[in-house]
Amino acid sequence: MNNQDTVNETATSEERTLSLLCHLSMLLGGILLPIIIWATQKSKSQFVRFHSLQAIFFQITLGVIIMFGVMIFLILMLVSGFGLGEFNNQGNSDPPVFFMILMFSFYGFIFLFAFAAIGYSIYIGLKAYKGELRRVILIGNIIYKKVFG
């Protein structure tokens, strides 16, 4: 464990299970599940509150990153000439090579990004199930300070 991680010895089995479900919500029900768990448990358990808020903001952050990536992809698609009528001067309607490379790269990035995000959520969920207060990258410290002071 690094200096940011602490073990909550007082977390009950139910609290650890709810925290695990919050992080696994990417597979089970999206952002709605941690919101429901946070709303029902926020005044009962700081441990569940911490993990549910992390799951919520982790999924929001992923959504923003994906939307930003799609916007960049659309801009690059327009720059490559896709959607501007004929692709070249010779009347050939085959898409340009740059566009094809861009498409394969984009889909590969989305696949790897989604796989990594799901894997990271499973990892954080398992740490929560062990009773650890593992902090998610970028947002974990902020949420820890808000929940635990």
Image: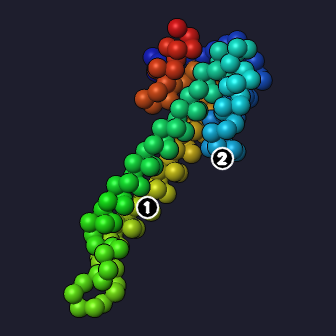
The residue lying at 26 percent from left, 66 percent from top is 79
> Which x, y percent locates residue 47?
65, 18
Quadrant of res 99: bottom left
Q: Is residue 91 left or right of residue 61?
A: left
Mark sitting earlier along the chain (2/1)? 2
Most extreme residue toward the front is 85
Specify the label residue 26 is tagged with.
none
Residue bearing mark 2 = 27
46 and 38: which one is in front? 38
Residue type highlighted by circle 2: Leu
What sort of colour scheme is used for the picture?
A: rainbow
> Which x, y percent locates residue 139?
46, 27
**From the viewer's perspective, is residue 108 above or below residue 42?**
below
The residue lying at 63 percent from left, 27 percent from top is 52
Q: Is residue 23 left or right of residue 107?
A: right
SS label for mark 2: helix
Circle 1 packing at 10 Å, graded few (<14), some (14-19), many (20+), is few
Residue 24 makes an appearance in the image: no
> Which x, y percent locates residue 9?
67, 13
Q: Is residue 124 left or right of residue 113?
A: right
**From the viewer's perspective, is residue 92 above or below residue 35?**
below
97 and 72: which one is in front? 72
The residue lying at 23 percent from left, 91 percent from top is 90
Residue type highlighted by circle 1: Gly
Residue bearing mark 1 = 108
Quadrant of res 59: top right
Q: What is the spatial separation of the Cα atoms under label 2 and label 1, in whole angstroms?
A: 20 Å
Residue 73 makes an appearance in the image: yes
> Which x, y percent locates residue 19?
67, 28
116 and 62: which one is in front? 62
Quadrant of res 129: top right
